[in-house]
Amino acid sequence: MFDFAPTHTATPKPELYRELVSAALALTESEPDGVANMANLAALMWTYLPDLNWAGFYRLAPGAGELVLGPFIGKPACIRIPLGSGVCGTAAATAQSQCVADVHAFPGHIACDAASRSELVVPVTAGDRVIAVIDLDSPRAGRFDADDTAGIEALACAISTRIGT
């Protein structure tokens, strides 16, 4: 039985993300199924990161030019997102993390949950190609910052070979 949780609620963000990455690696260490790993990783992010209303993955559909919904925790979500559309599609198309303080100010934002106010999307790469994105939404504007971006980028790098899509 796994009991992964942050050591303290007041843990500084860099340390919290180091703990999250360590837990993610331990949780996915011997599991070859990428979907199972994404499901557990979505739950892990939900457990470790406060003030979220959605946490999960979109996978790049090979040859389709779009992202397809992967495992997540939160309200039902958009199933397909074209590359370049919304925060997720932009992150996937540019291979650049997108940290958006106010999603209503983001051109072309796709609102799957009207309660979302801020969003962080980080590409997961295999070599030089994007295979998925990690998507975090919060009902609080300005929820995500540079520490969150760096932490989720470290997570994406650590788990990229374990979610093979």
Image (spheres, helix red, strand yellow):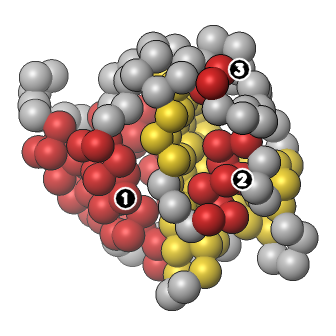
Name the side, left or right, on which 2 lies relative to 106: left
Q: Secondary structure at mark 1?
A: helix
Secondary structure beneath dot 2 equals: helix
Foreground label between 3 and 2: 2
What is the three-letter code of the residue carrying label 3?
Asp
CA neighbours of label 2 inside 10 A, class few (<14), some (14 to 19), many (20+): many
What is the C-alpha distance between the residues marked 3 and 2?
16 Å
The answer to whether 26 appears left or right of 90 in the picture is left
CB atoms of marks 3 and 2 within 8 Å: no
User: What residue lies at 46% left-to-right and 16% top-to-bottom?
Assistant: 141
Residue identified by numbered label 1: 153
- Give the residue displayed 75% in from the left and 25% down from the top: 111
Which residue lies at the image location 63% right of the left edge and 24% below the top edge? 105
Q: Which mark is residue 27?
A: none
- Crowding at mark 3 (Cα within 10 Å: few <14, some 14-19, many 20+): some
Viewer-proximal residue among 105 and 92: 105
Is tag 2's residue or tag 1's residue first in the polypeptide sequence?
2
Mark 1 vs 3: CB contact within 8 A: no
Which amino acid does the dot numbered 2 rest on? Gly
Q: Which residue is mark 2?
A: 89
Residue 53 drawn at (x, y percent): 54, 21
Of the pair 145 and 164, the residue shown nearer to us: 145
